[in-house]
Amino acid sequence: MKNFGYTIQNDRQIDYDKNDTKLYDFVAESEKSIRTCIFCGTCSATCTASKFTDLSLRRIILYLKRGLNESLKKEIESCMLCGKCNLACPRGVNTRNVILNIKRGIEHYEL
Amino acid sequence: MNFDYFVLPFCIGALILFTILSTRYAMWIVKLPRIDKRKAWLGILKFKFIGSIWEVFRESLLHRKIFKINAMLGWMHMSFAFGWFLLIVIGAMESKFHKSRVFNMPYDPIFLRYFEHNTHGFFFAEGFTFIMDLILLILLTATILAISKRVYSNLFGLKRTTKLILGDKIALYSLWTIFPLRFLAESFTSGLYNNGGFLTGTFGNIFASFLPLQMLEYPFWWAYSSALCLFFIFLPFSRYMHIPTEIFLIYLRNCGIRTSKNHTGYTEFEIYSCSRCGICIDKCQLTDVMQNKTQGVYFIQQIRRNILSSETAYNCLLCGRCTTYCPVGIDINKVRLLKRHDFAPENGFNFNYLDEKVTVAPFEYDVIYFAGCMTHLTPTIKNSMVKILNKSGDRYIFLDKEGSICCGKPLLFAGNEKQARELKYENKKLINKTGAKTLVTSCPICYNIFKNEYNLTIEVLHHSQYIKRLIENKKITLSKSQLNVVYHDPCELSRTNNVYDEPREILNAIANLQTTNHEKDNALCCGGSLGNFVISETERNKITNNMVAKLSEHKPDVIVTACPLCKKTMNKQSDVPINDISELVSNAILQEKNY
């Protein structure tokens, strides 16, 4: 079969009754502004590290909300904390503190 | 020998104070890193103590820095510190002259009036009595000022001050009673023996007319001695610990020891030198926008009590205003950064990708232009700089044109020293590869770290310094416009690196530079600081609003700054247009006509 570069994504169901939100709760407790995120993606568009890697803060917060903690763990490693996302964010999310607290949460829960 | 049982409280208090202080100081000196210990020893050989004594005289006795902040506050501190110092020195001299004995008991000068009633026999005696009375009068007025400061703190330029803890209260109240008790005890004795100077003598006679001095004299000497005892015992557990500690801090600082990246003995000296005066509270811009107790004084208090929270450590703009105004000269910013190490996440960073992804073609260049992350958010600055660089004729490379590596300072702000080192390594590799002699950056944050922490062999310039050099070398010619501008000093450029004059000279050449009340050391933070991880968007906006209002007091046409982050932050809140200095320069470049 000819490869057109497209694939069919695996079906991924997220059960919101069962998903693991402890990391999100940990972050949201110390940085409330994460609750105002509208997933617009401005942060990802402006990101310094995303020029070189797959890092996307929008996706990380999405993973966080869905409890996909394993997936975000790898992705967040390349953030340089430069703070461009913080300035670009239209919702005033304190992104640098979100990222720091995700890392702290990962250490805290030993994920 | 002069002796009475009431000298015992004083002696015991002094002994306890001496023991506690010497144990503490010995422990801290042991905790100094080896290199700092060496510096401290070498300081003795290099006669560093001479400069230190002069500084102790200026700062610990005359309180020059506090005078600069508020004259009343300075006067109160000076009359207390210098007055007490003179009382001790001249008192000691007086007691030695009286008996013509050099080695007398240490309590002799303090209780001299009780033991020696003959002030006529010795020709110096009356002079000494006069001087001692004068000093006592100064100390009494200082006490009155100190008490009124508690009631009308506004008179002393202090809007807010710290709350006293128990140790502070006991030490404070005993300090208030020391000099009035001395005055009463001396007056009573003078009244009884009909001697004394203009103060104690006069009041002694007045008291003698209606008080049973015979009965009162002895208890009051006891009370005076006990007040001294109480003050001495509680001094190490109160804010007054700063009095002896500051002397050591000044010496160590003069030996070239600075706050390092770890909590060392020097940090202990700094922490205990904090007098909790609260000057940093009024100078902190966070004070106006939030109730959190995060300012330098509270931060240091939390370290002293070992209850530092990550919220306090991270809730600071790191603008450095508190450090500038701290009368003791504690480097609060550095202490805060070193404390952040304890709270920073250690794992979860991986910058291996940088090694493969970022490359630069080796070539001979004169100048590297490193825009910095924030400059990429404000493309007008970037474009202006490119225009200026093209005009300059220097062979330059735009190092981070296609995506940059962060300079590492934001990671340092977060307390991630180790991770920042990786970024520094990558950047340094790139910079060295280009073979350029000058690195120009548009971002003061990058400038600060490139200059102070990269140990680069090449010259590091902020673009304002670079532009000024271009003007001096006649590589660009600029036209003067009629714009009225004010200049906002970015914290990382001005207070941290003392780049004050270059931007101002450029602005004087191309526009009418107006002065404001908030410039140079007194410059305000724009509120966009990368140093603060805690404050919310609303609070940031309030800070920005406040500072923009202060800068636009005289209705300038443009507010000029030299930092992309400041520009971006102020732009959101200001009615007056905000420009970077490079934008103004790029507009002012004279276009040669092409025929």
Image (cartoon, grey):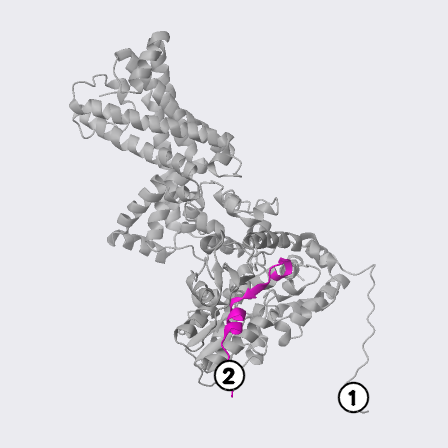
Label 1 resides on the chain identified as A
Identify the residue position indicated by label 1 in the image: A4
* Viewer-nearest of discs 1 and 2: 2
On residue B593, which mark appears? 2
* Of A45 and B76, the residue lying toward us: B76
Residue plotted at (38% across, 39% down)? B243
Residue A69, placed above or below residue B433: above
| Magenta-tinted stretch | B571-595
Residue plotted at (44% across, 31% down)? B146
Does residue A45 appear left or right of residue B393 in this picture? right
Residue B155, x across and y down, in percent: 48, 34
Q: Secondary structure at mark 2?
A: loop
Query: Where on the picture, by quarter, is residue B8?
Result: top left
Q: Residues within 10 Å of mark 1 (few under 14, many from 20)?
A: few
* Of A98 and B552, the residue lying toward us: B552
Residue B222, x across and y down, in percent: 36, 19
